[in-house]
Image: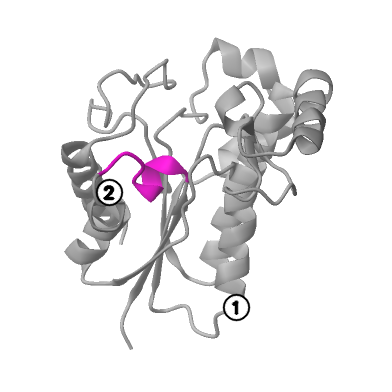
């Protein structure tokens, strides 16, 4: 039985803006380097809500887990999943007008109402912490090899903002202690980010996705990281 590399993420993992996304994106290049069959379920604008759900769904359908390696390319915590049934499966950033463009007028109004009146940024980060810890425990319980890659924002940095949002000794702080940092990387790896406009903490207003060379760099650093934690 061939081994499988299962990947899920947003536009970075999908390969948006590449000439040939299916064969130039880092999941495909990584699968070739490992010699594994690839299942890449990434979608542009995907939310962490959706990634967590889809990853658990895919793994739960399998009878055997020895042949699987999982790489999750987490997205910005501010994105959320909606059941509006449009092109990208309902992934919305609360501030991004372009992510509303494929929704009909009725659902666009609903989405904007949620963004403007019901969105809670602190809650979005709390959910992402919960997804990371829960998925970690789920994968480890099945002895599945995995790696979490976060190209946008390293939420596992205890800085002043972290304590301002969550507080010392809070529930989130206790969850933080239980997240295995060996299996979480990015956006800065070995002193470099995939796109130089990024820094250790967050993505700035970069208007592009990684190019072919940058996907090759991501492939190499993830490959090396997987080898370190095997």
The correct choice, above or below, for 91 with respect to 43 in the image is above
Q: Which of 63 and 58 is in front in this view?
A: 58
Q: Percent position (x, y) of residue 19?
A: 23, 46
* Residue at the image position 56 percent from the left and 27 percent from the top: 98
Give the residue at the far bottom of this rendering: 1
Which quarter of the picture shows residue 30? bottom left
* Residue at the image position 74 percent from the left and 32 percent from the top: 108
Of mark 1 and mark 2, the one earlier in the sequence is 1
Q: Nearer the viewer, residue 108 or 44?
A: 108
Does the magenta segment cover residue 168? Answer: no
Q: Can residue 227 be seen in this view?
A: no
Q: Percent position (x, y) of residue 109?
A: 80, 28
| Quarter that holds the N terminus | bottom left
* Residue at the image position 31 percent from the left and 29 percent from the top: 188
Q: Percent position (x, y) of residue 219?
A: 23, 49
Numbered mark located on residue 222 in the image: 2
**SS at badge 1:** loop
């Amino acid at each position: 039985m061939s081994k499988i590399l299962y990947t899920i993420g947003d536009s970075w993992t999908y390969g948006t803006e590449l000439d040939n996304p299916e064969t130039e994106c880092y999941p495909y290049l990584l699968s070739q380097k490992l010699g594994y069959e690839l299942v890449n379920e990434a979608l542009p604008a995907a939310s962490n809500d959706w990634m967590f759900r889809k990853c658990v769904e895919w793994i739960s359908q399998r009878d055997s887990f020895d042949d699987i390696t999982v790489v999750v390319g987490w997205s910005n915590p501010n994105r959320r999943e909606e059941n509006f049934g449009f092109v990208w499966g309902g992934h919305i950033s609360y501030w991004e007008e372009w992510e509303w463009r494929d929704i009909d007028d009725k659902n666009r109004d609903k989405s904007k109402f949620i963004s403007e009146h019901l969105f809670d940024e602190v809650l979005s980060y709390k959910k992402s912490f919960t997804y990371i810890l829960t998925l970690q425990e789920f994968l480890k319980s099945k002895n599945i090899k995995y790696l979490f890659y976060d190209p946008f924002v390293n939420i596992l940095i205890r800085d002043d903002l972290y304590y301002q949002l969550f507080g010392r000794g809070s529930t989130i702080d206790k969850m933080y202690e239980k997240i295995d940092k060996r299996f979480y990387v990015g956006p800065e790896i070995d002193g470099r980010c995939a796109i130089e406009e990024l820094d250790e903490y967050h993505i700035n207003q970069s208007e592009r996705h990684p190019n072919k060379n940058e996907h090759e760099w991501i492939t190499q650093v993830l490959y090396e990281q997987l080898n370190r934690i095997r």
